[in-house]
Amino acid sequence: MKAYQKFTLIILFLITILFQFNSNSYPYTQQEVIKLQPLNDRWAVVIGISNYKDKTLNLRFADNDAQSFYNALKDKCRFEDNHIKLLLNEDATRENIRKNIDGWLYKNTKKSDKIIVFFSGHGTQDLDNNKDENDGYDEFLVPYDFENEDISSAIRDDIFAYWISNLKSENITLIFDSCYSGGAAKAKGFNHVKTRGEIKVDNFVKDIFREVPKEGVALISACKDNQLSYETDDFKMGVFTHFLLDSFDKKSDKDMNDRLTIEEIFDNLKFNVLEFTKKNYRREQEPILISTMRKPFELVYFPVKSLTKSKHINEEIDNIIYQSFAAQDTRRKILLLDEAVNLDPSNYQARIYLADAYKEFKIYDEALYNYEIALSLKDFQTDSIYKRMSNLFEDKGEIEKAIDYMKKAIEIDNNEYRYFNGLASLLNKNKDLDEAISTYLISLNLNNRQGEAYFELGRLYIKQEKYDEAISIIEKGIKINPDYYEYYYLKGLLYRFVKNDEKIGNQLVGKFHKLDNYVRVGAIDDSEILWKDDKWRERIIESTLYNIKNHGFLVESYMRLIKIYSKFQKDINEAKKYYNELIYQYPFLKNVEEISSLLKDMSSKQNGFRK
């Protein structure tokens, strides 16, 4: 064998050994894409009109724009099928557009929901009818059934803005692939007004923005006020919509967090539209974005990759998770768990613990994102995640969404009485008292030995002034669990102020204070000598608010705050807030002289104190 042949064989042998070594040491053997579940807080109306009733207005690809955008909302943006209305051509009449925005969206969406309205079609102008435009012209969206001699058949910017401002959502994105500056063979705009010389051009998006009197709205337009929005055979759609959808890509992910906000998408979109139109038409089409969003609208989500791992990697992840349990600092815990998730994006436990850590640190968007990924993974119980998500929204103060997620947990496991208690508590916070009562009764039917459920049910009956029912349910609770001493407090109040038996009432309340050492220790705060001192008063207010958080049923705590705010802080609004909360919890107290006199005293001081 020749020398060069031997050398070649040696090289091949070494390559083989190296390849086998790398194959055995590399932790991942295959890859699977995990598609995230749809989100139920997203809604859209998508409109595209190529074929108009007036054939002279026909466009070529506007309906394709809308269809492609609709597909992207489902495939990349996690919209549910039944949360999107697609109106193409003859379905996009003026009345149908109104019904779906001012009707369907208005009826079905909540304050915390995210909404998109997309329109691809003609825009036009006409004389301002109420003198609210600086340039003397209103802008219009042109629906399928537009009649050229009747401008009222179009959708005036004022009217469109009215529909949007009626929506409860505080996270709305409006996207317009249209223009208002004059006709062109490949452009989505035409002149309705017959004038001599150049038309003065305002901008539809700016007008809408001015007309919508609310925060939380982003508006994206295909072009500036004096430009055209082009369609092209190159893409079989509008230039704007093509590059909008093209920007739903990793290249737009500037912070590399596997999600795209409206702003990230727009940055990429604007650059590409400008480049393409300058090169192909020697004219600029520059998209514009105006926004009053208070927090980012995360629109696009990239799939999570699940990797088959070696035993060594699984052990390493388990070790990192164990270290996170011992971490005293939440930041350290997040860093560790993020490392575990990077090693295995589909590790269910790492995702859950990372979400919990973000929630603990009040980084709610990241917590929610990781809970949502966990929901998309296999072989686990989703009810516990829904419960966690419910708790997250409760922490954020979004009680309606918290209720929705707790109901999802119950749908999966309707034998877990704790879920019913959680739901009842949320319903109580939302002041749905009848539903809260029925939910606690279901919980007690599943487990009739719950001290807290009887107690909270008694409080609900008191709020509804059903005092006999309250006493009955409290006595059932005492019979089952006589050591749950909060019962004695409620029963004592009812006997003292409803049954007018002061002796038994005082005995029962006294028994509660004797048993509850925490409340007895805080009794020194009722000394008005301490209230006069600014520093002591601040500490007392803080401790009393903490006491209310943990013992929200205590009359003494509310009375203390009412007196401090009205007499020493000179803040009648705060005093009245706690008075109203006290009366809401215990309606019978409004007839008690000591308490009703506080209201009279506050009213007499109102003019001299801070409003």
Image: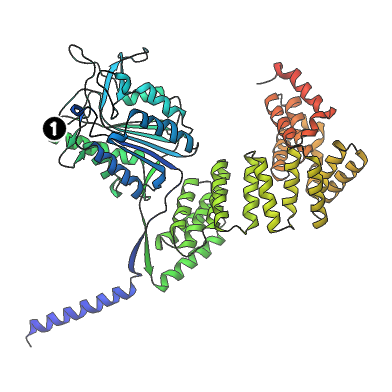
Q: Residue at x 38, y 33 (%)?
A: 218
Depth order, front residue of 287/498: 498
Picture residue at 26% right of the left edge, 31% below the top? 121
Mark 1 is on which residue type? Tyr
Residue shown at the point (80%, 52%) measured from the top left:
476
Say whether residue 35 is left or right of residue 461. Answer: left
Instruction: Give above or below for 604 relative to 17.
Output: above
Residue 486 coordinates in the image, percent (x, y): 79, 48
Say above or below: 148 vs 38: above
Question: Label 1 belongs to which residue?
Answer: 281
Q: Residue at x 47, y 62 (%)?
A: 348
Is 103 situated left or right of 289 in this image?
A: right
Q: Position of residue 528 (x, y in %)?
A: 81, 31
Say how many tags the image has. 1
Q: Give the image quarter of residue 212.
A: top left
Quadrant in which residue 62 is drawn: top left
